[in-house]
Image: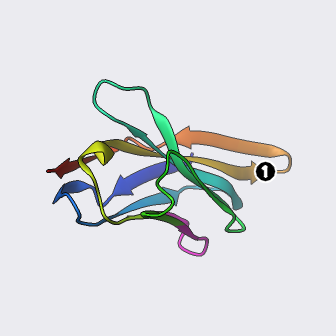
Amino acid sequence: QVRLVESGGGWVQAGGSLRLSCAASGMFFSINSMDWYRRAPGKQRELVASITGHGITDYFHGVEDRFTISIDNAKKTMFLQMNSLKPEDTGVYSCAADVAVGPETTWNGWGQGIQVIVSS
């Protein structure tokens, strides 16, 4: 059983910073990729950033100048450093992972999500 747990969310004023973490636990061999999604109030969930187990990153919705995704494979943890936060960054941030649990076998799942509130 693989489990993902997010931490680091909370309330911050516009222009501030937060660092989200997503810790993976359980039995798996390696991380294929991990992603950060967010769901703003009244909107659909959207992909914000992704990273492969080898550290290749991708960003979406114009956050690349403010957000940095990273991964610590040894600690099985992914991070999202969010700087210069804007009120429109408010939402529930969830991590997702694709990990290898056996030969030719992967597990895909989600964390429970964590709230980020950016006030103006």
Q: Nearer the viewer, residue 54 or 63?
A: 63
* Display coloring: rainbow
Q: Secondary structure at mark 1?
A: strand
Residue 7 placement (x, y as % from top left): 33, 58
Q: Nearer the viewer, residue 24 or 87?
A: 87
Q: Nearer the viewer, residue 108 or 83?
A: 83
Circle 1: residue type: Gly
Magenta stretch contains residue 114: no
Q: Residue at x 17, y 59 (%)?
A: 12
Count the numbered circles shown. 1
- Of all residues, the one furthest to the right in this rendering is 104
Q: Nearer the viewer, residue 110 or 92?
A: 92
Residue 45 placement (x, y as % from top left): 44, 32
Check the picture and name the quadrant holding the N terminus. top right
User: Dot 1, how many residues are within 10 Å of its Cα: few (below 14), some (14-19), or many (20+)?
Assistant: few
Q: Residue at x 20, y 58 (%)?
A: 14
Q: Residue at x 29, y 58 (%)?
A: 85
With respect to residue 64, does 112 lie above or below? above
Q: Which residue is mark 1?
A: 102
Q: Which residues are magenta?
A: 70-78
